[in-house]
């Protein structure tokens, strides 16, 4: 039961918070521990909806930042009856607030890349095992057990900084691979080229995961024909090269590396789950993750399938931060649950997210 208490929500273009347990005149008790096994055992749509609503209730009652955001939109567990009605927190809050749904200490902090002039996102992770279970189960569902694959990582921009969730994931997969040739590569493209050729000769199932600009460097400097290797790009030029649309990037890579198609990984600092594409930029999510698009002019309105909108992500593995995030990406969803990423809002178009916090 909630007890009356007077407090105010101050709005100056963003939410300013007081009293971590008091919201719009009410005190809310914290919930008991959430049964995390429910997240990774989701098998069908109805079960996803049920667990998503329970996670929403858990985070509403345990996350002061998210709770106040929901109150501003007049959304509470009493009024939200379906996961499509759950409010999506603008991803920018990970730059300006501590987004936490627990009193546990965040022993791991993942940070986004950024320039010295920009503010980076911080994802506070109290339970790293949730992340490990999420990325391992998702990877296995798409590619099989990592111990059956040689995993090569070409991620120089991520290796050159600390706090990358991608590096944490790939490093763990490499260790689980237990293949003597698995490992990271920085700028030693010639060595990587020779390694790939040797693995091809041995008919070794191989995954080469790399950031876009580094894969382009490899394809241009050391063209080859890979038949046993999956090439997966993680997106982003990181300011190293001119940005390319997906079709152009994938065409150059398929021609230079001799593969039929380019796989892709969709993830970010603020998420603990990843979606994967096995070609043509069409992504699939694991059962505990769902993509929804919002109207670019009215961010509180859910967009229909096959229409371009802002990407909202439900990532139930984000139990101790926020599972409902409005990103700055643009994309389309399809009736079969797949989606594609078409680009990003520019500064002039980001009003869609801004409206949600004014």
Image: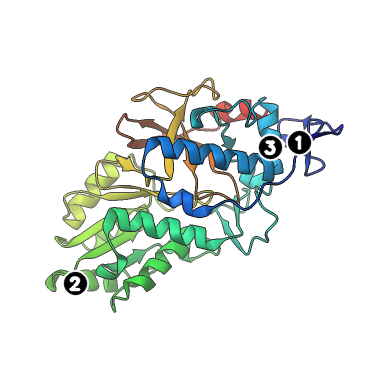
How crowded pointer 2 is (Cα within 10 Å; few <14, some 14-19, many 20+) is rated as some
Q: Is residue 118 above or below residue 90?
A: below
Disc nearer the start of the sequence (2/1): 1
- Mark 1 or mark 3: which is in front? 1
x and y, in percent, of residue 186 in the image: 39, 68
Residue 67, label in figure: 3
- Between marks 2 and 3 in the image, the one whose residue lies nearer the viewer: 3
Q: Residue at x 39, y 46 (%)?
A: 242
**Residue 329 visible in the displayed image:** yes
Instruction: Name the residue nearer the viewer: 48 or 106.
Output: 48
Q: Dividing the image into 4 quarters, which one contains the N terminus?
A: top right
**Rendered location of residue 116, percent (x, y):** 62, 54
Local crowd at mark 3 within 10 Å, few (<14), some, or many (≥20)?
many
Label of residue 1 in the image:
1
Q: Residue at x 27, y 60 (%)?
A: 144
Near-viewer residue (276 or 355)? 276
Q: Earlier in the sequence, mark 2 or mark 3?
A: 3
Q: Return the residue at label 2.
A: 199
Q: Secondary structure at mark 1?
A: loop
Q: Residue furthest right?
A: 6
In the depicted structure, whether residue 8 falls above or below residue 188 = above
Residue 216 is at least partly visible in this image:
no
Report the colour scheme: rainbow
Is the Cβ of the residue at disc 1 closer than 8 Å to that at disc 3?
no
Give me the residue at 58% from left, 28% from top: 80
- Quarter of the image containing the C terminus? top right
- Nearest to N terminus: mark 1 or mark 3: 1
């Amino acid at each position: 039961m909630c007890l009356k208490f007077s407090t105010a929500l101050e709005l100056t273009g963003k939410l300013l918070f007081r009293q971590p347990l008091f919201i719009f005149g009410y005190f809310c008790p914290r919930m008991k521990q959430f049964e995390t096994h429910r997240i990774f055992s989701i098998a069908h749509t109805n079960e996803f909806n049920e667990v998503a609503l329970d996670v929403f209730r858990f985070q509403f009652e345990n996350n002061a930042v998210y709770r106040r955001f929901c109150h501003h939109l007049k959304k509470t567990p009493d009024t939200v009856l379906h996961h499509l009605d759950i409010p999506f927190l603008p991803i920018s809050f990970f730059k300006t607030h501590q987004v936490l749904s627990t009193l546990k200490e965040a022993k791991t902090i993942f940070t986004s890349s950024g320039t010295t002039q920009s503010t980076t996102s911080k994802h506070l992770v109290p339970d790293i095992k949730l992340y490990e279970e999420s990325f391992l189960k998702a990877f296995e569902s798409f590619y099989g057990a990592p111990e059956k694959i040689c995993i090569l990582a070409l991620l120089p921009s991520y290796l050159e900084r600390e706090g990358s969730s991608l590096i944490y994931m790939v490093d763990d997969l490499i260790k689980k691979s237990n293949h003597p040739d698995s490992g990271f590569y920085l700028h030693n493209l010639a060595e990587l080229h020779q390694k790939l050729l040797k693995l091809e000769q041995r008919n070794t199932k191989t995954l080469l995961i790399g950031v876009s600009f580094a894969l382009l460097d490899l394809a241009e400097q050391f063209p080859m024909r890979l038949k046993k290797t999956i090439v997966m790009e993680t997106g982003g030029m990181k300011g190293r090269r001119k940005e390319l649309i997906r079709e152009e990037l994938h065409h150059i890579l398929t021609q230079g590396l001799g593969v039929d198609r380019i796989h892709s990984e969709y993830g970010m600092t603020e998420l603990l789950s990843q979606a994967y594409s096995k070609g043509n930029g069409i992504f699939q999510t694991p059962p505990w993750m769902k993509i929804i698009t919002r109207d670019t002019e009215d961010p509180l309105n859910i967009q229909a399938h096959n229409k371009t909108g802002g990407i909202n992500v439900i990532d139930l593995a984000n139990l101790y931060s926020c599972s409902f995030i409005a990103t700055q990406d643009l994309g389309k969803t399809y009736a079969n649950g797949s989606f594609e990423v078409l680009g990003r809002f520019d500064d002039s178009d980001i009003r869609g997210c801004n409206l949600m916090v004014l």
